[in-house]
Amino acid sequence: VERLQRRVRDHRAGYAQSLSVLARVKETNSHALTKTSVMLGLGETDEDIRATMNDLRNNDVDVLTFGQYLQPSKSHMPVKEYVTPEKFAEWQEEAESLGFKYVASGPLVRSSYKAGEFFLKNLIRDKSLSQNAA
């Protein structure tokens, strides 16, 4: 989320820069799939998350994952909140309603947490169904 990114991420990787990279991928190849992840539990608000999801959709991001931030060491930021599984389910439903092609959301979800596998299986299934219907 934009409000927290300077404290959470490397200063060389800004929020606007990340969005511009995702947008550039689509400009270069409109069929490319773009994906990003949001870690929760760092002090973000619901408004922060909604603004981030809207920014991502405005840049045509396809796949979004939500996971629980876990402090990797004492030198890293502490966890501010442990997000409930119910809240993760709410974020998944809201993200899907915004038009993301695939959303993985849960406390143990990581950026690569089977997201590609699940998405590709569904993509292949959907293509197969549409070919069989034709």
Image (spheres, rainbow, N blue to C red):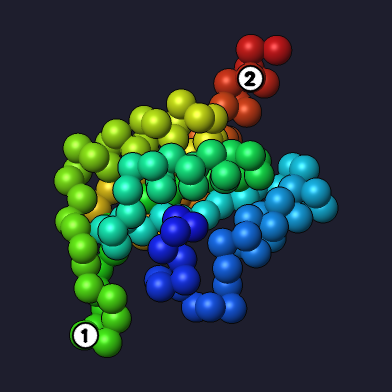
Question: Disc 1 designates what residue?
Answer: 74
Q: Earlier along the polypeptide chain: callout 1 or callout 2? A: 1
Crowdedness near tag 2: few (<14), some (14–19) or many (≥20) residues, C-alpha within 10 Å: few
> Which one is in front, 108 or 12?
12
Identified at 24% across, 83% down, the residue is: 73
- Report the amino acid beneath label 2: Ser
Secondary structure at numbered mark 2: helix
- Outermost residue toward the top in this view: 133
Crowdedness near tag 1: few (<14), some (14–19) or many (≥20) residues, C-alpha within 10 Å: few
Secondary structure at numbered mark 1: loop
For residue 122, side relative to residue 58 (left or right): left
For residue 69, side relative to residue 115 (left or right): left
- Outermost residue toward the right in this view: 28
- Report the amino acid beneath label 1: Lys
Residue 86 coordinates in the image, percent (x, y): 19, 37
Residue 96 coordinates in the image, percent (x, y): 45, 31
Q: Quadrant of the N terminus?
A: bottom left
Does 69 sit above or below residue 127? below
Q: Quadrant of residue 88?
A: top left
Identified at 47% across, 71% down, the residue is: 6
